[in-house]
Image (cartoon, helix red, strand yellow):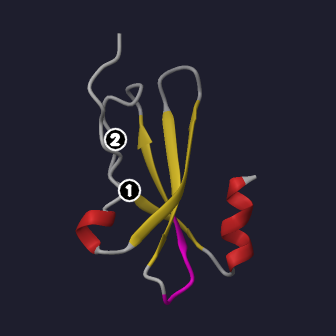
Amino acid sequence: SWSAPVRIPTDGAVDGLADGDLRIAGDGEGAWAAVWTRTDGVATPSVQIAMSLDDGASWLTAVPLAASTSEADVVSLGG
């Protein structure tokens, strides 16, 4: 059975910035990382990360992983 959905704290609805290009990966042992881009539509996008250590039941507060230096850096996250 599925549990109730849990929101990953991207803050897009709170800070008014656009969040996108979400990628999620797990280690098979209950740890998960969610990575996405954040942009205000003017500045170069930054890369954000949030972690879950309890199989996605809760998520730690998102933090900047890196400030992208070019659009190509952001696109390379998608593989």
Instruction: Decide whether residue 3 is among the magenta residues.
Output: no
Task: Tell me if residue 43 is in the magenta stretch.
Answer: yes
Residue name at image x 27 percent, y 72 percent: 15
In this rendering, is residue 15 above or below 44? above
Q: Main secondary structure of the magenta part?
A: loop
Q: Is residue 12 left or right of residue 26?
A: left
Mark 1 vs mark 2, CA separation in Å: 8 Å
Looking at the picture, tell me which residue is in the foreground, 62 or 70: 70
The quarter of the picture where residue 13 lies is: bottom left
Q: Residues within 10 Å of mark 2 (few under 14, many from 20)?
A: some
Within 10 Å of disc 1 (Cα), the crowding (few <14, some 14-19, many 20+) is: some
Amino acid of disc 2: Trp
Q: Quadrant of the N terminus?
A: top left
Q: Measured along the vertical axis of the image, is residue 49 above or below residue 2?
A: below
Question: Which element carries disc 2, helix, strand or loop?
Answer: loop
The residue singled out by tag 1 in the image is 62
Residue sitting at x 58%, y 21%: 28
Measured as percent of width and height from the top left, residue 29 is found at 53, 20
| Residue range corresponding to the magenta coloring | 42-47
Residue furthest to the bottom in view is: 42
CB under 8 Å between discs 1 and 2: yes
Q: Position of residue 37 (x, y in %)?
A: 53, 65
**Image height check: is 14 above or below 50?**
below
Q: Is residue 54 above or below residue 61?
A: above
Residue 29 numbered tag: none
The amino acid type found where label 1 is placed reads Ala
Residue at image location 66% in from the left, 81% down from the top: 69
Q: Which residue is mark 2?
A: 59
Q: Position of residue 57 (x, y in %)?
A: 32, 29
